[in-house]
Structure formats: C-alpha cells, structure tokens
Amino acid sequence: MKQKYAPFYFLIPPFLILLLFACAAPASHYVMVERNLLEGNYNKADSIVEQYKEKYGDRNAVLYYMDRGMTLHLSGSYEKSNYYLSEAEKRIEALYTKSITTESGAMFTNDNLLPYEGEDFEKVMINLVMALNYVYLGKLDDALVEARKIDHKLNLYNDKYEKKNVYKEDAFARYLSGILYEYKGELNDGFIAYSKAYEAFKDYNTNYGTPVPAFIGEDLLRLSKALGLHDEHKKYMEKFPNVKWKDIKEMQSNGELIFIYYSGRAPFKEDFFIDAPVPDISGDPYYLRIAFPRFVAQPSHIAYARIYIRSKNLEEKTYLMEDITAIAKKNLDDRIGRIRAKAIGRAVVKFTTAQTAKKAAAKKYGKDAGIIVGGLLNIASVVTEEADKRSWRTLPDKIQMARIVLPPGNYNIEVHYIGAGGEIIDKKTFAGISINSREKKILTHRVIK
C-alpha cells in the first residue's frame, strides 16, 4: 500500500537545507583583538587573528588578509603587513569575475555566501596603509606607487557609479601623497596632490563634517611660491590671509615631525530587518523578512591630541584627517538602494520557491503536506535572511595628524590625548626620535579609548 505521507520533504532542494547553516565571518574574536589593541599588545592581537584563519574561511579571505595587514602594521612588521595587504588586494581583483553558482545560491540565503570583496573605502585604505609601511621601510618610491594606485581606484569608482557616490575622493590619501612627493623633491606633483586634497577636504567638510586642516593652506602657499605659480599663489593668499607659512628653503634646511594617530574602533555592521506577514497562494500567512546592513558607530572619546616638544618649547595639536566611521556610513547609504533591490529580489525568489514547492506537495500528497512544506520553506527563508555584516573591523574610528618643523636633532615627543571637555584621557612619550635635515619623520600611534 502506498503511504499517505511519503517523504515529501525531499521536494525541498537539499542545498537549501545545507545553506541554512551558511554563516558570516567569525566575530567573537574581535573582542579579544580589540582588548589587546587597547592595551598596546599588537603582536598578541595579530596572533589572535592568525589563530582564527580557518574560521574566516575562503569566503572571508579578504577580511583575514586585511585584519592581518592592520595588526602587523601596528606591531611594526611592515614588510609582513604589506604581504598580507597585497594578498587582500589580489583577492579583491580576482573577485571581479564572480561565480554564477555562488551568486544564485546567495539568492536563496544571504550575501554572506558570497566572497567578501571589501567596501570601496576599505580598498583605498589597503593602499594607504601599504604606503605608510613603505615609508617606515624607507622605500618612498614604493610608497608613491601605492599613492598612484589610490588615484587609479578612485577614478574607477567614479566611472563605475557615474560620479553619484559621495566617496569619490580620499582627502587623507591625497594629502599623504603630497607629503611624499614633497619629500622626494617632486614639488609639482606635490602641489597637485595638495590641491586635490584641499578640494577633497572641502567635500569632506560638507559630507562628513571634517574641517579643512589648518596646515593645508601653508602647503599650498609654500609650493605655489616655490614653483613660481604666481596666479595660484595669489589665489591662495586670498583664501588663507591669516596663515603663517615657511619658505621651501627654510623647510628643507630643517626636518619635520609628522605625527599620525589612529583613534577608537571602526564601526561594525548589524542587521536591520523589515518583517511583514503576507498571504500566500492559498491565503495562508507567509512571514516575509528582508534584511539590510547598517553601520553602528564606536566613537572614540578622544577629540584630538596635543604634541609637546619641551626642549624647543613647542606644541601643536592634531587635526582630523579621516573620519572612517562617517565615510563608512555614507558609503553604505550611497549603495543601500542596490542592496535593497537585491534583498527584495531575494525575498521574491524565496517566496516563489516556497509557493511552487507547496503547490506541488499539496497536489501529490494532500493539503496538509503542502502546508508543512510551505511552512518549512518559510522558516528556512526567515532563518537564512541575514544582511552581509562583514567589514574591516581592525580599522580605527578616526585618523588625525600634526606637523611640526624641527631643526635636526634627537627629541622626546610627549603626546596628550584630549577629550571633548578638554580633559587628558591618556599620555604617551616617544623618546629619542631623531630628525634629520630635509627629513619628514612620520610617527604613528594607535589609541583605543
């Protein structure tokens, strides 16, 4: 006798059951990583990321390489850091050709099934960190190669999105390029980079609330004068009437300390769900769920840092160069329409699949079987609906910078990290920092407070 209730569950595609277990990159280890970054244990933070390599998995290889690149950068392992960041970049480039099979699978579950390619600003940050690594290694030409890669990437993004994205320039990357070109004696390229940085900072001020740094006027006035660009120099004299600037010869007879600090923790993504019960083909309730990602800020308590060089009775404050949290949020907002369209399309595919299977089961095994199959697939669609919450979590919240011209010598650099109310949150002393004539000494520090 034929059984009334055959194993109708086999009508559900087996891969749907398997994909119920598809999950995002591991997140629990970031608590341990951030704790060690807070304590300045950069090597330990890196070892934790390394220990979790298998849990990242192949789909999250780009994340693994970026996290290793950042923790190694902070620990002073600059060559090794560049190796991992270079691997991340290679993976991202290879992912331009996407797997149709993987894409179709993601339509039944969520985008965590797809290999992570990185946000646009994260891809630029790869080259920015690599450039700094090369500076520390004394390889200025290689650092400038990374600067040119950034220029190329930004041009590609502008073409890709038809210049509709807010993140179409990276002001800090442009400004760092200007410093490097000037350091190399390539003043014309330096002036162009500073000019682009100035325009980018004006956009930053509008879009992210990042003010134009005070010292950018000095750079534009100094190089326009040195290059004999009289019209440009006059223009910038009118734009920066109160700026005191040093002649290029005075700059070159001295050295310069460029202090960069990374503050706080990068934002992380969380799910934002839209839930709505809708009737299915039989009039039975179907629970529709659509998931979108959104960034959650982890703001630093530090407003700025003040640099003291007691032996010269000098002090200077840092200026905000890159608000990574603000950029991340705006970058996501720019493409949320594309994410929303894909999520809705995924919900439609899941709904259609469930209704087709329900109808087939009801026709072959009866109404109850159809209800059960439809219910199982509805549960599967809800359980597997999840936004892609992956991001480069080892980045900071903000990047700030100070510049101080110094005569050649050895210096103790005292740094006070100041809160919004003017209180001192933390202190750090860098002893025996040597500055040579014509040298631009870049010093970085990470503070998670």
Image (spheres, helix red, strand yellow):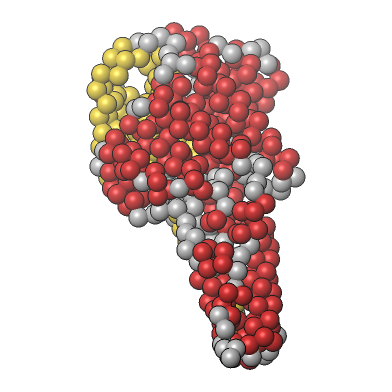
- Number of marks: 0
Q: Residue at x 59, y 15 (%)?
A: 187
Q: Looking at the image, is 142 positioned above or below residue 374?
A: above
Q: Position of residue 340 (x, y in %)?
A: 64, 63
Q: Position of residue 283 (x, y in %)?
A: 67, 90
Q: Residue at x 68, y 81 (%)?
A: 360
197 or 66: nearer the viewer: 66
334 or 439: nearer the viewer: 334
Q: Position of residue 139 (x, y in %)?
A: 47, 16
Locate residue 73 relative to residue 111 in the image: left or right. left
Locate residue 126 relative to residue 195 in the image: left or right. left
**Residue at the extreme front:** 1
Q: Position of residue 50 (x, y in %)?
A: 35, 40
Q: Residue at x 61, y 59 (%)?
A: 105
Q: Looking at the image, is 208 positioned above or below residue 169?
A: below
Question: Quick check: can you spot residue 51?
Answer: yes
286 or 266: nearer the viewer: 286
Question: Quick check: can you spot residue 420?
Answer: no
Q: Looking at the image, is 342 positioned above or below residue 274?
A: above
Q: Residue at x 67, y 42 (%)?
A: 97
Give the quadrant of the N terminus. bottom right
Q: Quadrant of residue 190?
A: top right
Q: Quadrant of residue 416?
A: top left
